[in-house]
Image: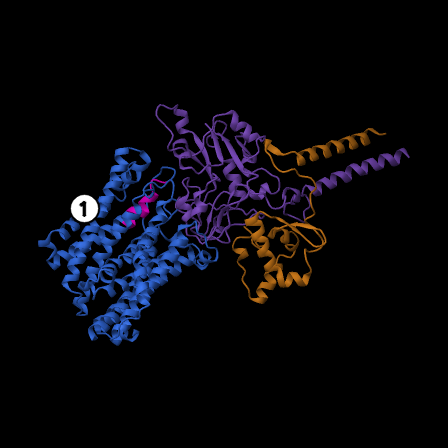
Chain colours: A purple, B orange, C blue
Amino acid sequence: MKQDRREFLRKAGIGALAGIGALAGLNPLSALEKTDMSALSGKPVPGRTRWGMLIDTRSCTDGCRQCVTACHRAHNVPDFGDRKNEVKWIWKSRYEQAFPTSGTQFQKPELLGREVLTLCNHCAEPPCTRACPTQATFKRRDGIVAMDYHRCIGCRFCMAACPYGSRSFNWLDPRPAISEYNREFPTRERGVVEKCNFCSERLARGLQPACVESCPGKAITFGDLNDPGSTIRRMLSEQETMQRKPELGTLPSVFYII
Amino acid sequence: MKPSGVLMITGGIVLVMILAVSMFSPGGGAETADRAAVAERDSTACIASKEYMRSHHMKLLDQWRHDAVREGDRIHETPDGRTFEKSLNTCLSCHSQNRFFCVMCHQYANVEPTCWNCHLLPTETKE
Amino acid sequence: MIEKALKGNRAYWAWIALLIVVIAAGLNAWAVQLDTGLGVTGMGRDISWGIYIAQFTFLVGVAASAVMVVLPYYLHNRREFARIVIVGEFLAVSAAVMCMLFILADLGKPQRVLNVLRYPTPNSMVFWDVVVLNGYLLLNLVGGWTVLGAERKGVAPPSWVRPLIYLSIPWAFSIHTVTAFLYAGMPGRHLWLTAVLAPRFLASAFAAGTAILILISFILRKTAGFDAGDEARKKLTVLAAYAGIANFFLLGMEFFTAFYSNVPAHMHSLQHLYFGLHGHGQFVPLMWLSLLGGIASVIVLLVPALRSRSSWLVAACVGLVASIWIDKGIGLVIGGFLPTPLEEIVQYVPTLTEMTVTAGIWAIGLLLLTMLLKVAVAVKTES
């Protein structure tokens, strides 16, 4: 009896471990990640969620590129190694480049050289979606400015319209320039425009964007700008923050602590 | 009760708890939707009959693409109540077991779908 | 009527053969571009439009300038334009065709171009540009061809064609206004973000387009023995001169607003184009050539003693067209991307492939224009 109970508990413990292991996607047969269906809560309600990001440039280490690497690997972003054909979703700019209309006179020298993380701002009033002739780029119901690569004709109007230089065009076939495929995410093809998607594929699984997760300095906070109780809203209300080129009325969803 | 048995049981419980906590806690102080049950993706049965899928998979995928990319509507519910994510990866999670599943028929029928310009075929690899 | 384009002398066929050779080279270069991607051009992430869109912008103006002969002839009954009005209409047709081909050549996915009609998007200026350009092409083709056909038969043109021609007059203004709106509505591109862009586009179009019409009238007189008449040329010269003045006046407005206000963002693009910025000034010599050459040409067109001499008139017309081509193509389109949104200056140099495609499209337009004018001249000289 005593023996049986011990045996049962032991087996139950192992069983539970195996179950968790399978749930966590350790099953070697399925290389693809499991989907959390509850996170995919049907059609999103327009205007209920507005995803946003707060970047603390003070905790962002100069020279660190972990978020860039993580993002570009997760999304099969090609690396052509030259500026002309460059494709990038997230990158680092100097302070004066990211905020060209901010004052630079008599600022502390450290600030002027500081590296600032730049990416698509997922504007609430995006000029790119206004310019697109096919609605290949459009604002999703959760505020993300998305690309429909199936529809893009490659006219590059969105690139001319974007005041942040956040969009890249596939001047060449991207596949040879991808060092390692992430099989869960498609590549793009020659002739379409691409950009940051706020990791909508990870959000659908209840995960944080790849850049947020990979940041060793925890410099990026991600959350719902429409939820007054969210961490990002609390942080925004407590600190002084900046948006890039606010004078253009694009209402960026990416904020910065300087 | 032998000490080794106690160790094994407590060790197992602790591991389960760690795993459970790490799985269900949202990371980095962000707000993501509550996650409860994890649905079965590796279903043993396809979302529709073989005959239907043979003749209509392109229409269904086109609809899925529209729903998922443009509407943000990512859940497909079968008539018998099973749910699947509207994603080409859902199909591939079973059908990539045969690496030539898509290619075989398309080659025979001499059709060249543009899916694989971007989506990765199971045969597409990097050395 | 089209058979008239198939009868010509040696020079005519040599010209056609030359154009076909250039077209073939252009098609070949386009095939290379389709195969490899737009990476074969000089365009890049920062300067994402190049000479294709520059030619497009310039040629929309050429197309629109048909109104400079259509309006006085049909609305004001100025008989001196009787022989040149068809030249204007057919120039508009070929220019509009070239515009569409340049857009097609610039697309990353030309096979998806019909998506513009499958998913009509009224908030996009491209959608409206496609609508107005195609409409304008049709109006001019139908209007010009029908009137010419009636003339050949020696009968009055059908009554339904007159409303179409009247419609083409405001339509001409619309095509260049909408083309200006493509640029003028973009935040963050300060060279384009200006209310005088559409007026300036119209002024430069009427100057360059009218000058091209004068040049064509000289070519037709020399090669086909078809003279549009000195009276028509005189009137067109005056129109080109005043349109040129309006263009440079509006350019001056840009300079005043940017530099008197001293707002850096408004000054930067002009500084880069005309004086150099952060040590970069790729286009400075070209822009001064355009500015000084353009002003000199306008002066020649204004001085009666000079403009009445054919050699001076031709030189001034060539100068004005070249000036506006540089200003509107290179200066406005490519210069508008600099400095980049991240305040950087990059270089743009068109590649050989890109230039061959460009030459090919020009050759298609010239072939179309040659054949249309051949028909027109044949009908006019017979009747």
Question: Does the segment drawn in magenta span residue B12?
Answer: no
Which residue appears at 76% of the width and 38% of the height?
A16
Placement of C31 over or under C258, stated as above or below: below
Q: Please, which residue is most extreme toward the left here?
A: C305
Question: Majority secondary structure of the magenta segment?
Answer: helix
Position of the C terminus of chain C by quadrant? bottom left
Query: What x and y, as percent, mark residue A148?
Result: 51, 50
Placement of A246 over or under C195, stated as above or below: above
Question: Does the segment drawn in magenta span residue C330?
Answer: yes
Q: Residues within 10 Å of mark 1 (few under 14, many from 20)?
A: few
Q: Nearer the viewer, residue C266 or C137?
A: C137
Which residue appears at 59% of the width and 66% of the height?
B108
Is residue B122 visible in the rendered structure shown here? no
Q: Nearer the viewer, residue C239 or A144?
A: C239
Query: What x and y, as percent, mark residue C240?
Result: 20, 54
Q: Given the image, what chain letter belongs to the residue carrying mark 1?
A: C
User: On the image, numbered disc 1 is attached to which residue?
Assistant: C292
Position of the N terminus of chain C by quadrant? bottom left
Left or right placement of residue C145 versus residue A21 in this view: left
Left or right placement of residue B98 versus residue B13 in this view: left
Query: What x and y, as percent, mark residue C231?
Result: 14, 62
Query: What x and y, as percent, mark residue C104?
Result: 39, 58
Q: Nearer the viewer, residue A217 or C313?
A: C313
Q: Amino acid at mark 1?
A: Leu
Query: To which quarter of the image does residue C9 belong?
Result: bottom left
Placement of A1 over or under C43, stated as above or below: above
Is residue A23 visible in the rendered structure shown here? yes
User: Total number of numbered labels?
Assistant: 1
Query: To which quarter of the image does residue C282 belong?
Result: top left
Which segment is the magenta one? C328-340
Disc 1 is placed on an element classified as: helix
